[in-house]
Image (tube, grey):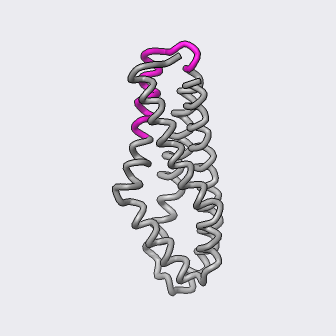
Amino acid sequence: MIDGPYFALTMLGALGTGLVAGVFCGFSTFVMKGLGSLPPAQGVAAMNAINRAATTPAFMIVFMGSAVLCAMLAVVTFVLWPEGATVELLTGSALYLIGAFGVTVVANVPRNTSLLRMDPDSQETAVYWRTYLSEWTIWNHVRMVASAGATLSYVLALA
């Protein structure tokens, strides 16, 4: 059983990854469907506005803070090697760092950057928008499942 500051760190890790999983779940289950139902120019404009808003401190503290917590938990786990929770802690850290943070960096953000550079009213953007919706949402599903898996792993480590 883990305790003290390590327990608190794990609780914060579970809370942070759970909050991020919720955000990703919202996008996977209804936000992207709603945006996809709009005419392409409106959908692109709305998604670009969302992407700009996502980089504000409120979300970035949770998203980046969770990555820092997961990295700290992984390092502390390697150093302390706690009895009975090592697998869960390392699994939770790997799921979030690779499946949520890593996928964001290599799959979702590049698509967001491309979309932001396009003219929402152009025919090229209208064609790209359908591809963007599909690909971005698939990668978001990965992020959602990985974040939720990280949360579950941390909760199991606390049990």
Q: Which residues are magenta?
A: 67-85
134 versus 159 height, above or below: below
Q: Nearer the viewer, residue 91 or 112?
A: 91
Q: Residue at x 56, y 20 (%)?
A: 85
Q: Position of residue 21 (x, y in %)?
A: 56, 48
- Of 117 and 4, nearer the camera is 4
Q: Toward which corner of the image does residue 88 lie, by quadrant? A: top right
Asked whether 95 falls inside the magenta stretch, the response is no
Place of residue 118 in the rendered image (x, y in percent of width and height, measured from the top left): 47, 77
- Quarter of image, res 51: bottom left
Nearest the eye: 126 or 87: 87
Quadrant that contains the C terminus: top right
The residue located at (59%, 74%) in the rendering is 35
Q: Residue at x 55, y 31 (%)?
A: 154
Labels in figure, total: 0
Where is residue 142? Give x, y as percent: 62, 49
Is 86 placed left or right of 64 in the picture? right
At a point 60% along the width and 84% down the height, the residue shown is 39
